[in-house]
Image (spheres, rainbow, N blue to C red):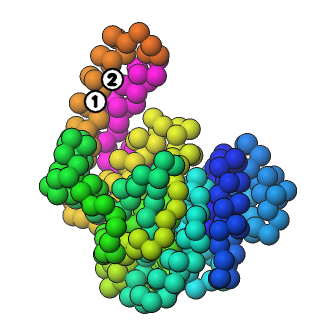
Amino acid sequence: MIVNWNTREVLSDCLKSIYEQTTGIEYEVIVIDNASSDGSAEMVKAKYPNVNLIENLENKGFAAANNQGIAITKGRYVLLLNSDTRIIDNAIAKVIEFADGRTDGGVIGCRVLNPDKTVQQTCFMFPSLPNMFLSSTYLYKIFPKSKFFGRERMTWWDRKDTRQVDVVTGCFMLIRCEVIEQIGLLDERFFVYGEETDFCFRAKKKGWKILFAPVAEIIHLGGASSRQVTPEMTLQLRGSILLFIKKHRNRMIYTVACFLVAMFFFFRVFYWFARGLFSNGATRAEFRTARTYLSGTLKALFGAEGLCL
């Protein structure tokens, strides 16, 4: 299941890697194109006629588009796969083999590599007030081996062992269809970001295990779609966290979370504004970032509804 928005070239590479690197299993490929303007849909039809292509007339977001694909799938599993990934060494079949042996696993992820083959820190903990505060300080970047400062993203973990986690990152997220039948589809209120967190939370509440299994590796370029609208995506990411907390935590926690997000943006306004004033380079981008954070400060005080697209 691949949702695409204006990533024609990387989507083509992704599809090529699937067909070249997946053997020993039966599978179908579904691409949901969210009204791309770069010829992505035409490329799929011309180069990959076996792909089941859904063409949307508007950008429905990641969750809603995946739900369109899930509605027509016929498999035992659904694999949510980002368009900017590359399958290597029969990774999909290896994860399927692992999943077949772990029937308690409702959602499963694998090792994800950067293009230079270093490990991406996929999988993370559910949002909470302590995790929000610690991630906002960025101290996990200074102390990546600390289990305290790096707790939300588990920066201390090398991703070499199988373990239960809270959230499997959505760039490669294998879901057992029994889970979807039990808890329902992705929540479409999450336009982009947060939908996998919400899904894993609901699955875990029903007794399913969320598993990370280093039995296979893929390559992930990272953010090919979201980089096209970075300031807006910054707001969207924090808004998705607030939406999750509003949905699954109490009112008091949600109110404090809104304040923390507002502070996250507020303290960054001054940094980016000063950087724009004293920079010899592209100050326009820096002032734009400062304006984005100022907007985020004000919108966060109105909660998730102010930040989410």
**Where is mark 2, residue-wise?**
272
* Displayed quadrant of residue 249: bottom left
Q: Is residue 251 left or right of residue 44?
A: left
Magenta span: 284-309
**Picture coordinates of residue 238, whole percent (x, y):** 35, 47
**Picture coordinates of residue 146, whole percent (x, y):** 16, 53
Separation of residues labelled 1 and 2 (CA atoms):
6 Å
> Which residue does the image show at 68% across and 54% down from the upper left?
13
* Displayed quadrant of residue 129: bottom left
> Which residue does the image show at 38% across and 72% down from the upper left?
212
Q: Residues within 10 Å of mark 2 (few under 14, many from 20)?
A: many
* Displayed quadrant of residue 4: bottom right
Query: SS at mark 2?
Result: helix
Query: SS at mark 1?
Result: helix
49 in magenta: no
> Which residue does the image show at 32% across and 48% down from the upper left?
303
Position of 58 relative to 271 (above/below): below
Disc 1 vs disc 2: Cβ atoms closer than 8 Å?
yes
> Which residue does the image show at 41% across and 41% down from the upper left?
234
**Picture coordinates of residue 187, whole percent (x, y):** 47, 66
306 in magenta: yes
What's under tag 2, amino acid-wise? Answer: Trp
Provide the major secondary structure of the magenta segment: helix
Q: Residues within 10 Å of mark 1 (few under 14, many from 20)?
A: some
Position of 253 relative to 30 (above/below): above
**Where is mark 1, residue-wise?**
268
Number of numbered labels in the structure image? 2
What's under tag 1, amino acid-wise? Answer: Arg
